[in-house]
């Protein structure tokens, strides 16, 4: 299973809607909703071209850090889900992306 499924095809790390970055940082420390979160590892493909050679592991990205303390799935700045979905098709800046797996901690 891919750890990070992502429809941000405008990102240099995206290949066939899967993330191949070395490591992903989801940010948005006081998020109340999905759109308050962002992928801090986004790189604009039109500037950086394709960067899908993950050198930390053999396949897709499996390094997921997250500073969204308000999410139920966050534990010590790591995500406890096996897999997340990142969305923001057509994004040209990281704030246009979001973690759609976010769930507000109650
Ligand atoms: S937007 Fe983030 S999760 Fe999606 S491919 Fe780029 S670095 Fe990976
Ligand atoms: S599901 Fe929650 S803890 Fe996991 S990456 Fe998304 S916002 Fe962070």
Image: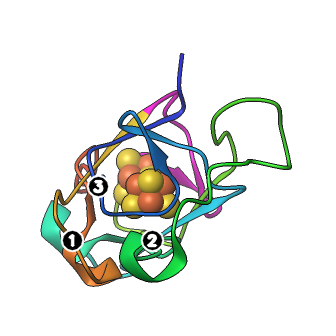
Residue 96 at what x, y percent from top left?
Answer: 20, 76
When the figure is inspected, residue 66 is found, relative to residue 7, above or below; the finding is below
Judged from the image, the secondary structure of the residue bearing numbered disc 3 is: loop
Dot 3 or dot 2, earlier in sequence: 3
Which residue occupies the foreground of this view, 95 or 54? 54
**Mark 3 near mark 2, Cβ–Cβ under 8 Å?**
yes
Find out if the beta carbon at label 1 lies less than 8 Å from the nearest ligand 1 atom.
yes
Which residue occupies the foreground of this view, 44 or 36? 44
Residue count near mark 3 (Cα–Cα under 10 Å), binned few <14, some 14–19, many ≥20: many
Q: Is residue 102 left or right of residue 44?
A: left
Find out if the beta carbon at label 2 lies less than 8 Å from the nearest ligand 1 atom.
yes
Q: Which residue is mark 3?
A: 8
When the figure is inspected, residue 5 is found, relative to residue 36, above or below; the finding is above
Residue 78 at what x, y percent from top left?
Answer: 62, 54
Q: Which residues are magenta?
A: 73-83
Residue count near mark 1 (Cα–Cα under 10 Å), binned few <14, some 14–19, many ≥20: some
Dot 1 or dot 2, earlier in sequence: 2
Report the residue at 25% width, 79% height from top: 92
Q: Which residue is mark 2?
A: 42
Q: Which residue is mark 1?
A: 91
For the C terminus, the quadrant is bottom left
* Mark sitting on residue 45: none
Q: Is residue 99 left or right of residue 96?
A: right
Farthest residue, direction top: 1
Residue 1 at what x, y percent from top left?
Answer: 54, 16
Report the residue at 26% width, 45% height from top: 7
When the figure is inspected, residue 43 is found, relative to residue 76, above or below; the finding is below
Judged from the image, the secondary structure of the residue bearing numbered disc 1 is: loop
The answer, for residue 105, to whether it is visible in the render is yes
**Mark 1 near mark 3, Cβ–Cβ under 8 Å?**
yes
């Amino acid at each position: 299973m891919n750890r990070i499924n992502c429809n941000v095809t405008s990102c240099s790390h995206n290949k066939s809607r899967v993330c191949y970055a070395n490591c992903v940082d989801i940010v948005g420390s006081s998020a109340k909703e999905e759109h308050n979160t962002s992928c801090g590892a986004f790189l604009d493909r039109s500037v950086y071209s394709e960067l899908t050679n993950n050198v930390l592991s053999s396949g897709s990205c499996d390094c997921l850090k997250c500073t969204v303390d308000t999410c139920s799935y966050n534990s010590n700045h790591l995500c406890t889900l096996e897999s997340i979905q990142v969305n923001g098709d057509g994004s040209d800046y990281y704030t246009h992306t979001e973690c759609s797996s976010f769930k507000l901690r109650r």
